[in-house]
Amino acid sequence: MSTPTPPRPRSSDPSADSAATVGSTRAALLLAALGACLVLLVQLGWQPLLDLDRRVARSLHESALSHPGWTGTARVLTDWVWDTWTMRAVLAVTVLWLWWRAQRASAVRLLVLAVFGTLLQQLLKAVLGRERPRWEEPVDSANFAALPSGHAMTAALACGLLVGLVYAYDSRRWLRWLVLGAAAVSVVGVSWTRVYLGVHWLTDVVVGSLLGLAIAMWPARAVLTGIETTRRRTGPSARSDE
């Protein structure tokens, strides 16, 4: 019985790695710029965008009042499955796993990104100070400012990093698609629950998602290069740092 061939790194060509880095950086800048534009429009009080926020919030709030079963499910998802602390716990486990695999530079980078994302999120909330939606019959509650959504930003950051790690570390196509699908459902799902439960405006979750993905993508190649470099030098099963 033949021994299965271990997965091969995606590229050993420095020019390909450089092109991927440039592409990742450009994508991160584009996402950050889109998020910044939305923040600016909100701060300037651009009426079409604010009207859209109000229409979407009102429509979903009426649905939440009319469908208590869906509302209860949304609260479980947002408070437990996609909660910010759940996402941070997933990242913490990933950091520990990378450290155990002796990928310590990558582990430190992921930890720094998680902390940076949290600090940026809180700083923006404090500076922008956008009020959350207010309802006569609220179905949920939340504290602090609205923009950006902490749930959406944390989920997008965590899921973006995990997808990048899987694509760099494992060549099994089914696993890549599984993680990518779960990540997409998580980011869209948590964004929907925050607006559905009436604690965020639509632009809050869109900006949060854009910024979370931008942070995840900006240094993605730096994080993943450590993994791929180690694999090329010592093989897939080795546990030496870069």
Image (cartoon, grey):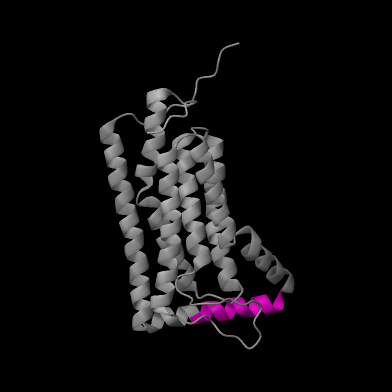
> For the point 56% across and 46% down, which residue is it?
93
Magenta stretch holds residue 65: yes
Name the residue furthest top.
1
Q: Quadrant of the N terminus?
A: top right
Q: Is residue 224 left or right of residue 81?
A: left
Left or right of 84, for residue 213: left
Residue 50: image location, x then y, percent: 43, 81
Which sits in the foreground, 46 or 90? Answer: 90
Measured as percent of width and height from the top left, residue 229 is found at 37, 31
Query: What residue is rendered at 49% in x and 39% in y?
Result: 99
Q: Which residues are magenta?
A: 54-67
Give the residue at the far right of this rendering: 69
Q: Quadrant of residue 242?
A: top left
Residue 119 shown in magenta: no
Q: Position of residue 190 (x, y in %)?
A: 57, 63
Above-or-below relation of 101 to 29: above
Predominant secondary structure, magenta span: helix
